Image (spheres, rainbow, N blue to C red):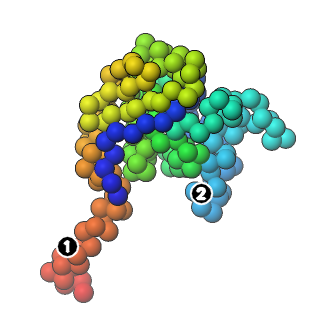
């Protein structure tokens, strides 16, 4: 794993407060064998009709194709604690989420996948969303070290849960990777405790 300090990409604004995990990835898609299949089902019920025809959702618009930064509103990721929601976001190709606030479990699930969730106030978020609509190719740079977002010569302040920020900067956000990296110490402790 590598530290995540600063990165950029195109943005897309998905409007709405209290967007829950069932809206992000409907429950019927949780039967998948691997998470790899989830990207195409992201926001499925608001993107497609019953026959699978596009409803013209912003995620499917040509101008936002390839967007890597999702912008939304208040209490993003609320509802059930399914980890399939951040998995679907990641498999769709999105690398970060900017919102007013996040549900705690969703935030934690995103962090362990390496998806930074940063908060930005309403006025700044509105201006950023307008910039993205005006120029969909404008690059958004998220600076986790400086706690800033830069887009089209505009600089916005962001906030982030400090423990998550530290984990991204130190490349310790994936608990499984941390466990594997400490395999020698774990083996030595097992010997001391008489488990081997």
* Figure label count: 2
Which residue was labeled with disc 1? Answer: 185
Observer able to see residue 85: no
Disc 2 secondary structure class: helix
Quarter of the picture holding the C terminus: bottom left
| Residue 186 spot, x, y in % from top left | 23, 73
Q: Classify residue 49 as left or right of residue 75.
A: right
Residue at 26% across, 36% down: 145
Q: In this view, does 154 lie above or below 58?
A: above
Viewer-closest of 34 and 127: 127
| Residue 163 spot, x, y in % from top left | 26, 42
* Mark carried by residue 36: 2
Q: Which of marks 1 and 2 is nearer the N terminus?
A: 2
In the displayed orientation, state which residue is furthest to the right: 51
Quarter of the picture holding the N terminus: bottom left
Q: In which quarter of the image is residue 193?
A: bottom left
Viewer-closest of 76 and 182: 182
Q: Classify residue 37 as left or right of residue 17.
A: right
| Residue 160 spot, x, y in % from top left | 32, 33
**Alpha-carbon distance for marks 1 and 2?**
32 Å
Residue at 19% across, 83% down: 191
């Amino acid at each position: 794993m590598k530290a995540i300090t600063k990165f950029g990409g195109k943005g897309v604004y998905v409007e709405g407060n209290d967007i829950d995990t069932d809206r992000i990835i409907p429950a019927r898609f949780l039967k998948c064998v691997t998470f790899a299949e989830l990207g195409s089902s992201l926001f499925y019920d608001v993107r497609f009709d019953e026959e699978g025809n596009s409803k013209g959702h912003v995620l499917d618009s040509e101008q936002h194709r390839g967007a890597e930064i999702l912008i939304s509103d208040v209490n993003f990721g609320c509802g059930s604690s399914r980890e399939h929601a951040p998995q679907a976001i990641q498999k769709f190709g999105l690398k970060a989420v900017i919102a007013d606030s996040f549900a705690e479990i969703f935030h934690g699930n995103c962090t362990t996948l390496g998806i930074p969730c940063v908060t930005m106030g309403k006025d700044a978020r509105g201006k950023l969303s307008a910039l993205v609509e005006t120029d969909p190719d404008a690059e958004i740079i998220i600076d986790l070290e400086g706690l800033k977002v830069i887009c089209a010569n505009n600089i916005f302040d962001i906030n982030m849960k400090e423990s998550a920020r530290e984990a991204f900067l130190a490349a310790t956000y994936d608990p499984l990777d941390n466990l594997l990296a400490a395999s020698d110490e774990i083996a030595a402790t097992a010997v001391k405790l008489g488990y081997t």
